[in-house]
Image: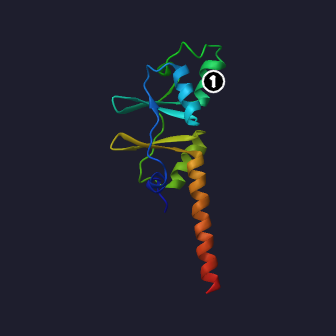
Amino acid sequence: MKIVQQIIAAKTSEIFSVTGETPVFDALTILMDRNISALMVIENEVLTGIFTERDYARKVILQGKSSRSPLIKEVMTENPITVKPTDTIDYCMMLMTNQHIRHLPVLQDLKVIAMLSIGDIVKFIIEDQKQTISHLESYIRQ
């Protein structure tokens, strides 16, 4: 059974985050500069929320608000769904599908150690399937 730790091992270890006091405009700039679509909201090393492009679209733009005035704490998703390094990839896929989310913060002993995106998981599954096919082809040729 494949687990979250295996994906984390293959990813860069950089964690992108903001605080609740960060202006939304500044968070958008980070999203653009890093070419990512979600930021964890961390206060005193504790995950308090997640800010995604979806939060921006639904809670700022569609509400007719300016991007410059609100703070992240006003528009973030509080208490995001998280996973542990020992959780299975299948469990992550089930969570993402059932909860209609595209990002999962990974916590170990209540500390953020990574963020998984649906893209990370799909990429991992594809690579794993390629390896399985290669092994099977090699076995058949023997």
Q: Residue at x 56, y 14 (%)?
A: 68
Q: Nearer the viewer, residue 126 or 104?
A: 126
Where is residue 107 shown, x and y percent of the image? 40, 43
From the viewer's side, name the closer residue of 96 and 121.
121
SS at mark 1? Answer: helix
> Residue under circle 1?
58
Locate the C terminus by quadrant: bottom right
Residue 52 in the image, given as x and y percentages of width and height: 56, 31
Left or right side of 91 for 85 = left
Q: Residues within 10 Å of mark 1 (few under 14, many from 20)?
A: few
Residue 55 quadrant: top right
- Taking depth in this image into account, of 15 and 43 the one nearest to the observer is 15
Residue 15: image location, x then y, percent? 44, 39
The percent position of residue 92, horizontal first and vertical second, equals 52, 49
Question: Hey, what amino acid is under mark 1?
Answer: Arg
The answer to whether any part of residue 19 appears in the image is yes
Residue located at (61% from left, 64% from top): 129
